[in-house]
Image (spheres, rainbow, N blue to C red):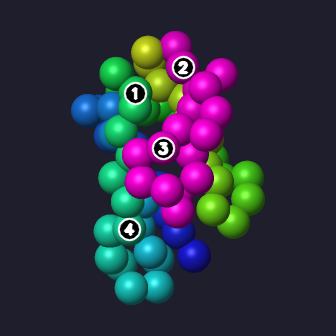
Amino acid sequence: MFSGQEGEEGIIKVWDTRSYNLIRVLKGHTDTIQMITGLHKNQIFSASSDGCVKGWDITKPDEVVYNL
């Protein structure tokens, strides 16, 4: 099970909630992350003050799957 952490620096930290280990640091936004939501087992979507919504596959480091 995973948890996402929003950051003012435009990054998302993905944590393993069982081991408390940092799994991924996702970069792609240029402003404060406002919201993170999970849709599928390995996918999350994030919205930022930069006006972008991004979809991520957390099994692939720093790879944006969707730009909305």
Residue 6 found in image quarter: top left
CA–CA distance between discs 4 and 2?
23 Å
Is residue 64 positioned above or below 17 on the image?
A: above
Q: Decide: few, some or many residues near mark 1? Use Cα within 10 Å; few <14, some 14-19, many ≥20.
A: many
Q: Which residue is mark 3?
A: 63
The numbered mark, 2 or 3, whose residue comes first in the sequence reads: 2
Three-letter amino acid code at the position of disc 3: Glu
Q: CA distance from mark 1 to mark 3?
A: 12 Å
Are circles 3 and 4 on residues that touch, CB within 8 Å? no
Provide residue 54's location: percent of width, then percent of height. 57, 32
* Disc 4: which residue: 23
Q: Residues within 10 Å of mark 4 (few under 14, many from 20)?
A: some
Q: Give amino acid for label 2.
A: Cys
Q: Quadrant of the N terminus?
A: bottom right
Residue sitting at x 42%, y 54%: 61
Q: Are marks 2 and 3 in contact (CB under 8 Å)?
A: no
| Residue 55 placement (x, y as % from top left) | 61, 39
Residue found 48% across the figure and 44% down from its top: 63
Residue identifier under label 2: 52
| Residue 29 tag number | 1
- In this view, the residue farthest toward the top is 51
Q: In what element is the residue under mark 4? A: strand
Q: Position of residue 32 (x, y in %)?
A: 36, 27
